[in-house]
Image (cartoon, grey):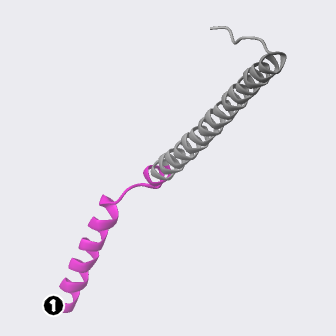
Amino acid sequence: MKKVLSIIAVAAISATFVACGPSKEEMEAREKAKADSIAAVEKAQQDSLAAAEAETAKMAEEAAAKAKADSTRVADSLAAAAKGGKKKK
C-alpha cells in the first residue's frame, strides 16, 4: 500500500511540474525573441562599423585635401621667393 501511495504521489508531483512548465508556443516565442534580439545586436554592430569606416574615410579625405592645399601654398611661396617677389600678408 505504501508503494502504491508513493507511486501516486510521485506521479502527481511530476504532473504538477509538467503542467506548470511553459507551453510549446511560449518556448517558440522565447526562441524567436532571442533570435530577433541577436539579429538586432548584429545589425547595430554592422551599422556601427560602417559608420566608423565612413568617418575614417572622411577624415582621410580631409587630411589629403589639407595636405594638397599646404603643398600648393608652399609651392606658391617658393615660386614667389624664386622670382624675388615679396610675400603678401
Decide if residue 6 is on the left or right side of residue 24: left
Q: Quadrant of residue 56?
A: top right
- Name the residue tied to disc 1: 2
Residue positioned 73% across, 20% down in the render: 73
Q: Nearer the viewer, residue 27 or 69?
A: 69
Residue 30 within the magenta-colored segment of the rendering: no
Vertical arrangement, residue 26 with respect to residue 9, above or below: above
x then y, percent, for residue 34: 48, 50
- Secondary structure found at label 1: helix
Query: Could you tell me which quadrant the C terminus lies in?
Result: top right
The kind of residue on which mark 1 rests is: Lys
Depth check: give the residue in front, 20 or 26: 26
Coordinates of residue 46 in the picture (x, y in percent): 61, 43
User: Is any atom of residue 17 visible in this view?
Assistant: yes
- Quarter holding the N terminus is bottom left
Answer above or below: position of 22 versus 76: below
Front-most of residues 53 and 14: 53
Q: Quadrant of residue 27?
A: bottom left
- Residue 53 vs residue 27: left or right? right
- Where is 36 relative to 5, above or below? above
Q: Seen from this angle, which residue lies furthest left?
A: 2
Q: Which residues are magenta?
A: 1-28
Q: Who's the residue at 56% across and 39% down the image?
A: 48
